[in-house]
Image (cartoon, helix red, strand yellow):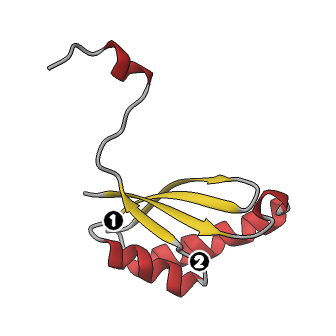
Amino acid sequence: MPKYVIEREIPGAGKLSAEDLKSISQTSCKVLQNLGPEINWVQSYVTENKIYCVYIAPNKELVQEHAKQGGFPANMISTVSTIIDPVTSEQPSQ
């Protein structure tokens, strides 16, 4: 199943309180529950003015629907083509 990175522009995101983040997370989870088991939220990274979210879903449209129903911005949705990490540096070249 495809993995997506969603860029959400949220001015002041890095200054959101723990309670704000909890509320946003709860809203996201409720929407995910309503959309069904095909879409999964993996995790999110909060920066100064953006939140980057990783989702697994069958298509971008379902990710967009999640954003719409949750009232979240989805300024950019990118399909992950490959994942690399430090272990990648140790793999033999093909």
Type of amino acid under label 2: Pro
Circle 2 residue: 73
| Residue 62 placement (x, y as % from top left) | 36, 77
Vertical comparison of 37 with 91: above or below: below
What residue appears at the point 36 percent right and 17 percent down from the top-left corner?
89
Q: Quadrant of the N terminus?
A: bottom left
Q: Secondary structure at mark 1?
A: loop
Disc 2 vs disc 1: Cβ atoms closer than 8 Å? no
> How far apart, in angstroms, are the residues tagged by discs 2 and 1?
17 Å
Dot 2 or dot 1, earlier in sequence:
1
For residue 94, the mark is none
Q: Residue shown at 76%/69% (left/top)?
A: 11
Q: Is residue 55 left or right of residue 53?
A: left
Q: Secondary structure at mark 2?
A: loop
Classify mark 2: residues with Cα within 10 Å, few (<14), some (14-19) or many (20+).
some
Residue in the foreground of this view, choosing between 52 and 93: 93
Q: Where on the picture, by quarter, is residue 21?
A: bottom right
Q: Amino acid at mark 1?
A: Ala
Give me the disc on residue 57. Answer: 1
Q: Nearer the viewer, residue 27 or 16?
A: 16
